[in-house]
């Protein structure tokens, strides 16, 4: 462990410097070492290290480079979002030696941050880099199964960096306490390790925050000081922590570390309050807090005042958690929000409705919002009660069969049938155009002029002319 200034955060102060310092992960270390020693005589020119945050993926590459004498050219997620950045830095380094002739490797950190649509050309540039490189390319990712990474998975050696066991986390925390001359109970270290869930970075940060200003750490002190993990949690974990929170601070921390956005979190809480709270008064208080949060969210949308967001989050998390006065603890199976499930099922129908609204808006010169709210409801009444008139409207607006099915519902086949009959009676476009061309041609022909006097034969004149020789 490298010691330095007391002002250096412990996560950097106790960062492993060599592979021998790097605890656990023997399988990942061995695979990576074997691959890089055989390079370029390997099946893959790139390796993909994947695993949860805080397991030391980037640190493993740095230790490997230091032990084997490689110079690291590192790019993180913000650096390789654009094609020109990768070409300027990584591809330019792919066939050159480092300073003083040192071997070089390229590290692309957090490649799952690439967005195939937003970061146009970034993914293609990474693939081109792997294709032409003459030096090892190592990538790291938290979620290797992201659809964006499929092309990279196909051309890389995948190496898993697993969560650290609780025992290994405790072992490292003990070494840090010894170096910092801090007395810490074993149970307190186990509690910190348990809360970290294999995230060593979080465990070290927690130990530093707990040890600040004290020389002795007990289990009760850890439980008093530490809130919930500042890391993303799935919806079920988030709800469990909000509903079981004993303080407003813990509930707010649980909401802040959720994978869900605020709107979606509100839907999850709304769906599961009745399952979690049985007492009518608890239920009333929880929904009162949630309804106030919804009011604030509505005002944010209407006014654009994002300062109100903190009030909404406080009410939907701490407000709901503190609504429960009974101390009864019960296991609950949380459910996916029915509103979201219904919206997913009706997504296609809503898409058709939006298409109809745009069609009406273009014909009537109104907004799509007006078309949705004030025109489509009346059209649905017409289409479901008067198929003949509905067919005329559909034909006049050139509606697709899908649009007719949305508006007519159970009478859609009847309306579509009438539309087809009407189409047969209407002249085809080709015949109409042909008649128009013929009419124009006829109009352009010179009119027959009466014969002049010179052209008239003698004796064939009219009036007095017939008598003049």
Image: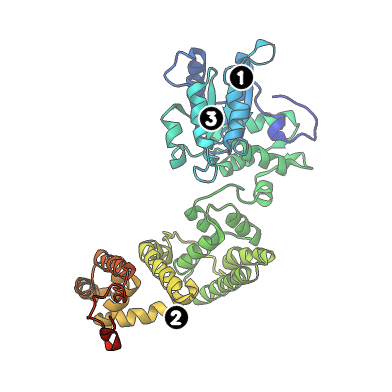
x and y percentages locating residue 384 in the rendered image: 28, 80
- Ranked by sequence position, the earlier of labels 3 and 2 is 3
x and y percentages locating residue 6 in the rendered image: 80, 33
Callout 1 crowding tier (Cα within 10 Å): few <14, some 14–19, many ≥20:
many
Front position among marks 3 and 2:
2
x and y percentages locating residue 428 in the rendered image: 24, 67
Which residue is the site of mark 1? 65
Front position among marks 1 and 3:
3
- Ranked by sequence position, the earlier of labels 1 and 3 is 1
* Mark 1 element type: helix
Residue placed most toward the observer, 23 or 146: 146
Q: Give the colour scheme shown.
A: rainbow
Residue drawn at the location 45% of the way across and 78% of the way down: 373
Between the residue at mark 2 and the residue at mark 1, the CA separation in whole angstroms equals: 66 Å
Q: Name the side, left or right, on which 260 lies relative to 463.
A: right
Between the residue at mark 1 and the residue at mark 3, the CA separation in whole angstroms equals: 14 Å
Callout 3 crowding tier (Cα within 10 Å): few <14, some 14–19, many ≥20:
many
x and y percentages locating residue 264 in the rendered image: 51, 61
Which residue is the site of mark 2? 374
Which residue is the site of mark 3? 139
Residue drawn at the location 63% of the way across and 24% of the way down: 73
* Mark 2 element type: helix
**Does the CB distance between marks 1 and 3 fall below 8 Å?**
no
- Which image quarter holds the N terminus? top right
Residue 98, visible in the rendered structure: yes
* Mark 3 element type: strand
Quarter assignment of residue 254: bottom right
Residue placed most toward the observer, 143 or 171: 143
- Which image quarter holds the C terminus? bottom left
Asked if residue 462 is positioned above or below residue 132 in the image, the reply reads: below
Between the residue at mark 3 and the residue at mark 2, the CA separation in whole angstroms equals: 54 Å
**Does the CB distance between marks 2 and 1 fall below 8 Å?**
no
């Amino acid at each position: 462990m490298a010691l330095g200034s007391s002002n250096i955060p412990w996560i950097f102060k106790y960062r492993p410097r060599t592979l021998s310092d790097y605890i656990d992960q023997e399988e990942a270390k061995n695979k990576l070492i074997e691959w890089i020693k055989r390079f370029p005589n390997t099946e893959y020119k790139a390796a993909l290290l994947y695993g949860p945050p805080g397991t030391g993926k980037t640190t493993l590459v740095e230790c490997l480079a230091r032990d084997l004498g490689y110079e690291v050219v590192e790019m993180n997620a913000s650096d390789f979002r654009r094609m020109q950045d990768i070409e300027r830095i990584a591809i330019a380094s792919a066939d050159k030696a480092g300073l003083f002739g040192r071997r070089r490797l390229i590290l692309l950190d957090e490649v799952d941050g690439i967005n195939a649509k937003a970061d146009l050309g970034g993914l293609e540039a990474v693939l081109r880099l792997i294709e032409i490189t003459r030096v090892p390319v190592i990538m790291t990712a938290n979620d290797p199964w992201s659809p964006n990474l499929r092309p990279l998975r196909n051309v890389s050696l995948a190496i898993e960096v697993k969560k650290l066991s609780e025992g290994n986390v405790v072992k490292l925390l003990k070494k840090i306490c010894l170096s910092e001359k801090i007395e810490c109970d074993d149970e307190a270290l186990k509690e910190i390790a348990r809360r970290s869930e294999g995230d060593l970075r979080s465990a070290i940060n927690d130990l530093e925050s707990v040890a600040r200003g004290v020389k002795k750490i007990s289990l009760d002190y850890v439980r008093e000081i530490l809130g919930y993990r500042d890391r993303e949690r799935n919806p079920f974990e988030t709800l469990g922590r909000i509903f079981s929170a004993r303080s407003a601070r813990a509930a707010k921390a649980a909401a802040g570390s959720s994978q869900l956005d605020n709107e979606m979190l509100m839907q999850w809480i709304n769906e599961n309050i009745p399952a979690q709270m049985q007492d009518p008064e608890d239920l009333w208080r929880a929904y009162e807090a949630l309804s106030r949060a919804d009011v604030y969210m509505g005002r944010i949308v209407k006014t654009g005042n994002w300062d109100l967001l903190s009030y909404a989050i406080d009410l939907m998390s701490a407000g709901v958690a503190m609504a429960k006065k009974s101390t009864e603890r019960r296991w609950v199976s949380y459910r996916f929000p029915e509103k979201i499930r219904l919206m997913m099922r009706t997504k296609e129908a809503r898409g058709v409705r939006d298409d109809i609204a745009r069609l009406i808006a273009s014909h009537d010169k109104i907004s799509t919002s007006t078309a949705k709210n004030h025109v489509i409801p009346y059209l649905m009444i017409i289409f479901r009660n008067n198929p003949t008139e509905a067919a005329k409207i559909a034909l006049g607006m050139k509606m697709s069969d899908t649009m007719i099915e949305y508006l007519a519902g159970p009478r859609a086949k009847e309306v579509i049938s009438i539309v087809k009959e009407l189409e047969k009676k209407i002249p085809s476009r080709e015949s109409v155009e042909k008649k128009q061309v013929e009419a124009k041609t006829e109009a352009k022909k010179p009119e027959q002029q009466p014969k002049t006097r010179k052209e008239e034969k003698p004796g064939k004149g009219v009036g007095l002319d017939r008598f003049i020789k």
